[in-house]
Image (tube, helix red, strand yellow):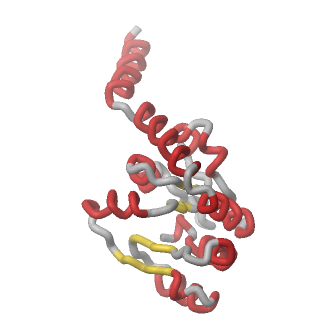
Amino acid sequence: MPNKWLRHLLDALPAIIEQHPTAYLSVAGFGPEEAALRAQAQHLGIADRVRFLGAVPQSSLPALYRRAAILVATFVRDPSGDQEGLPVVLMEAVGCGCPAVVGDAAGIDDLLGEAAGDVRVQPADTSSLAATVSAALANPEAAPRRALAMRERLVDTLDWDRIAAAYGDVLEAATG
């Protein structure tokens, strides 16, 4: 959990709930910060709107992504320099057609193309994070269309035939 910095999303959640009174947050996974995140939710008065799901079996993730109104994956570099590498959770969610709001991680532009600019936020700016999530929730017709466009880009980028051909080109160039 540390490199996703859910604390920023929790800080933004009261403003999101103010705009969308039925909104709630489901947190899949577990980690060393869970107790602190639960305490933060309690302190913010939103504990009843945050569901800590714990470890979710891989086979259950597609259904979870499809039910979600939006995936918020606040990728950031932590103070030790650790950051999300290949954002697998984003690829999985987008592959399932789940709209997304993301922080900055290596490969976001490559994976999402032009759509990256529409869904990227600075997670520590909780006002901006809340506004971006609220805007996506306020326009439930546009978010799935954007998710579909991101999915098409993702499928095209990660197509095995395309990747194999690119490796072939590199090997051919290297061997002259």
**Where does residue 166 sit, x and y in percent of width and height?**
41, 22
Image position of 35 with respect to 31: above or below: below
**Where does residue 40 sit, x and y in percent of width and height?**
59, 86
Q: Is residue 134 left or right of residue 161?
A: right
Q: Quadrant of residue 64?
A: bottom left
Q: Residue at x 53, y 65 (%)?
A: 3
> Which one is nearer the viewer's eye here, 167 or 146?
146
Asked whether the viewer can see residue 112, the reply is yes
> Which one is nearer the viewer's eye here, 165 or 59?
59
**Where does residue 24 sit, x and y in percent of width and height?**
52, 76
Q: Residue at x 54, y 41 (%)?
A: 112
Asked whether the viewer can see residue 81, the reply is no
Q: Residue at x 55, y 74 (%)?
A: 23
**Where does residue 74 sit, x and y in percent of width and height?**
58, 62
Residue projecting furthest to the top? 176
Q: Residue at x 51, y 39 (%)?
A: 149
Image position of 170 with respect to 57: above or below: above
Image position of 42 with respect to 7: above or below: below
Screen quadrant of the C terminus: top left
- Disc tally is 0
> Which one is nearer the viewer's eye here, 78 or 113?
113
